[in-house]
Amino acid sequence: MSKKRKHDTVAPGKGLRKSRDSGTPLRRAVKIPVWGDLGLRMALAIFLVFAVIMIHWWDRDGLVDHYDGHVSFLDVVYFTMISVTTTGFGDIAPISDRSRLIEALIVTPVRVAVIFIFVGAAYSFVIKRSWENWRMSRIQDQLSDHIVVLGYGISGSEAVAELIDRGTDPHCIVVIDPSEDRLSVAEALGCNVMVGDATRDETLKAVRIDKAQNVLISAGRDDSTILITLTARALAPGVPISVVVRANDNESLALQAGATNVINPVRFTGLLLAGSAKGEHIADYLADLASVSGRVQLVEREITAEEDGIALADLKTGGRGLRVYRNGEALGFWEDACQTLRQGDVLVEIVPTPNGTTLGDGRPQPGD
């Protein structure tokens, strides 16, 4: 299912940047699209103007038309428009105390509101859009310690969903895919997205792949995945890269291309099927281990200072230690070397998620 090899570790940086080479900017979903915001503002302005027209028509006896002496409905519409948008021309004017009170207490506040609505619309349509583009450019310029997902098909989308369930901020995830339809789904989750070809150096440089925390590659085709892995490894020598391949023969090629972890979903499915043949609960438990939302989960972490010198069976978290990685060597829980943990050891353990309310690392479940 997974193969590992030693790699140099580069301390993650911090930060995201507008693609100056690829020409495709990074983007992120906004709560209300610009056109939707503009439509809401226009609808509100029209409603306010219509309400003033109805008030003026109801109080038309308090108005005087200096042109023909008769106030028609068209005159009311005209008077409303110039009253709301200007200070008026004086050809139609309020003459009764009630009409003047209406102009002072109702029409004047509506006039101010309409002005603010149109100023706000201009802000949203021009200034805010320019500001959002500039902001995303600045984010992209400072991007680091992020997770880059190359390919948003079935595997990529499931990986992103699981990362978010595990507590990863969607704003720290960058998804690159050539399909706008797929990216729209990732964008709706709050991820940063970019339309692009992940085999191109300029695309990966635009998202500062060398500053990434992890790179996940699932291109849908093994040949594309391996080519993307070669490109990513050349640009980010020290960043962990996990890839998905479907043919057994391509696993070694992916490792040679620079992958840190190679995952074969076909083989993993075979393991689940074989396990289910030996017992009806094995497949269910393996799926439980793989997901953060189950009763138990696998956690990889470094041992704490308090755990230095203790046995693998005496972990402070109460979890079950399964394997220790020490100086690049994998040690099983049954081996004598695991009876004394050392600073720098990396531990893989099974941790309970009691009642489904707490994640394996002690954090509350999302939404709790």
Image (cartoon, rainbow, N blue to C red):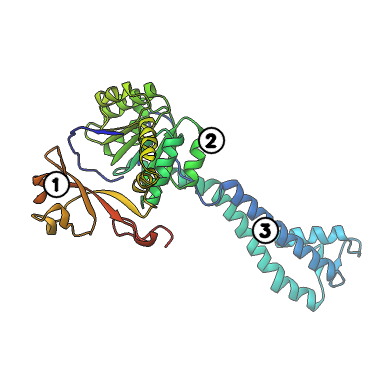
Q: What's under tag 1, amino acid-wise? A: Asp
Q: Quadrant of residue 27?
A: top left
Tell which circle, 1 or 3, labels the residue nearer the N-terminal end. Answer: 3
Discs 2, 3 touching: Cβ within 8 Å: no
Residue 60 screen position, x and y as percent: 85, 69
Looking at the rendered image, the disc whose residue lies closer to the viewer, 1 or 3, is 1
Residue nearest the observer in this picture, 205 or 165 = 165
Q: Secondary structure at mark 3?
A: helix
Bin the neighbour count of mark 1 within 10 Å (Cα to Cα): few under 14, some 14-19, many 20 and up: some
Tell which circle, 2 or 3, labels the residue nearer the N-terminal end. Answer: 3
Q: Is residue 158 left or right of residue 94?
A: left
Residue occupied by mark 1: 345
Q: What's under tag 3, amino acid-wise? A: Leu
Cα distance in 3D space between marks 2 and 3: 32 Å
Looking at the rendered image, the disc whose residue lies closer to the viewer, 2 or 3, is 2
Residue nearest the observer in this picture, 99 or 10 = 10
Residue occupied by mark 3: 44
Q: Is residue 119 above or below residue 27?
A: below
Residue 49 screen position, x and y as percent: 73, 60
Residue 321 screen position, x and y as percent: 20, 50
- Residue occupying image coordinates x 54% and y 46%: 126
Discs 1, 3 touching: Cβ within 8 Å: no
Looking at the rendered image, the disc whose residue lies closer to the viewer, 2 or 1, is 1
Q: Is residue 149 above or below residue 293?
A: above
Discs 2, 1 touching: Cβ within 8 Å: no
Q: Secondary structure at mark 1?
A: loop
Residue occupied by mark 2: 181
Q: Is residue 171 visible?
A: no
Q: Quadrant of residue 368?
A: bottom left
Tell which circle, 2 or 1, labels the residue nearer the N-terminal end. Answer: 2
Cα distance in 3D space between marks 2 and 1: 43 Å
